[in-house]
Image: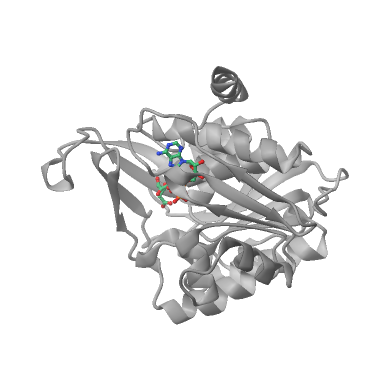
């Protein structure tokens, strides 16, 4: 229908590619980070969160990434395994690098920020040699995070994964996932993210993220979609925070979704939960309206929770939210 075909001869549904990190979320909410005393540790990193979200909904998922050779790295791998996510594509970095940390500040439901510690982060040491062709060949879909393109050798590894995914007929999903502290310059974002996005079937991002990719400001969503339809994209999804989301299909379909009411604790995690549930819906063959609805309902649950990864909902919870609104 929308030109996206998931091959039924593959046993893995989704492989996530990129950052495996730690979120340290402030326990004392509604106060600045300067006054925060304690934090709770969760697995984090946007592509990790999306893969966890999709796996919890029932997708058979795997991951390609690198973790540090430390307790945090071991925690991440064991968490993924506990979630049923295949970890044979997760390498352990040589000693010396560290796990990326994200300290979150929850000042108010609308004022949230993240303080990242990413110097010498193991995830960006992912190498092309870590990407096993036989593993990529097993996947129906591969989801690449834009942040994996920020530095070498992770950049080359991400491009190698894209090349292999295309070779073996996996649907390629690109989450722009712009994190300013990881990139050297806007020119690099423009060059490398564009190159990756141009090869992907589905592109997801916020309005500002698409602006970065296009080197413009204030482009209309429709013009954005049209531009990417000139490459490989068949579906472009623009997220607009509390104003909902809009998806454009290459066959001309335009789909809009609002948000589900939420008792917002913090806003981060919205995009990851949305993406995980949206991808799940797409892989069930649902129409785009239903995928957006599922993604939005999932996001409303996660913004009402303290964590991102741990709070990714099950199908029952998402369906209950949808039924309540209906
Ligand atoms: N305050 C909110 N209440 C309910 N749903 C929200 C809220 N903020 C975002 N969402 C949902 O999450 C989706 C993604 O949010 P957005 O903030 O655009 O992504 P990101 O976290 O990647 O910046 C939105 O399209 C919407 O469905
Ligand atoms: O991506 C990271 O490194 C941090 C995430 O784990 C974090 O919780 C977050 O920012 C979630 O991102 P979002 O869903 O795009 O808001």
Q: Compared with residue 302, is residue 249 higher up or lower down, i.e. above or below? A: below
Q: In the rendering, at what x and y percent does residue 283 appear?
A: 74, 41
In the picture, measured across the screen, residue 117 lies left or right of residue 207, that is left
Q: Residue 91: in sight, yes or no?
A: no
Q: Residue 302: in sight, yes or no?
A: yes
In this view, the residue farthest toward the right is 9
In this view, the residue farthest toward the left is 35
Tell me what residue is drawn at x 58 percent, y 38 percent: 295
* Along the viewing direction, whichever of 48 and 196 lies nearer the viewer: 196
In the picture, measured across the screen, residue 6 lies left or right of residue 94, that is right
Q: In the rendering, at what x and y percent does residue 186 appear?
A: 43, 77
Tell me what residue is drawn at x 73 percent, y 72 percent: 230
Quarter of the image for residue 290 reads: top right
Quarter of the image for residue 3 reads: bottom right
Tell me what residue is drawn at x 48 percent, y 66 percent: 125
Q: Quadrant of the C terminus?
A: top right
Total labels drawn: 0
Q: In the rendering, at what x and y percent does residue 59 appear?
A: 69, 36
């Amino acid at each position: 229908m929308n030109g996206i075909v998931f091959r039924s001869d593959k046993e893995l549904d989704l492989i996530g590619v990129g950052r495996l990190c730690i979120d340290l979320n402030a326990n004392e909410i509604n106060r600045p980070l300067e006054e925060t005393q304690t934090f709770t540790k969760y697995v984090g990193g946007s592509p990790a969160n999306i893969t966890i979200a999709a796996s919890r909904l029932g997708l058979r998922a795997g991951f390609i990434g690198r973790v540090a050779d430390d307790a945090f790295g071991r925690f991440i791998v064991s968490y993924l395994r506990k979630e049923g996510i295949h970890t044979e594509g997760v390498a352990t970095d040589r000693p010396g690098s560290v796990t990326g940390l994200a300290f979150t500040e929850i000042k108010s439901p609308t004022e949230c920020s993240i303080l990242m510690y990413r110097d010498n982060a193991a995830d960006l040491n992912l190498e092309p040699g870590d990407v096993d062709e036989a593993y990529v060949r097993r996947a129906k879909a591969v989801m690449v995070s834009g942040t994996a393109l920020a530095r070498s050798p992770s950049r080359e590894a991400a491009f190698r994964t894209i090349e292999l995914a295309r070779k073996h007929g996996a649907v390629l999903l690109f989450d722009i996932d712009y994190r300013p502290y990881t990139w050297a310059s806007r020119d690099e974002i423009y060059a490398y993210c564009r190159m990756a996005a141009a090869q992907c079937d589905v592109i997801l991002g916020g309005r500002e993220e698409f602006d970065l990719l296009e080197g413009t400001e204030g482009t209309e969503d429709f013009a954005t979609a049209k531009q990417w339809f000139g490459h490989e994209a068949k579906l472009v999804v623009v997220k607009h925070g509390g104003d909902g989301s809009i998806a454009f299909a290459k066959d001309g379909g335009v789909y809009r979704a609002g948000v589900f009411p939420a008792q917002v604790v913090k806003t981060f995690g919205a995009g990851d939960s949305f993406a995980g549930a949206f991808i799940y819906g797409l892989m069930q063959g649902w129409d785009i309206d239903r995928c957006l609805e599922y993604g939005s309902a999932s996001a409303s649950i996660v913004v009402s929770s303290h964590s991102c990864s741990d709070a990714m909902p099950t199908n029952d919870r998402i369906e209950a939210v949808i039924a309540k609104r209906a």
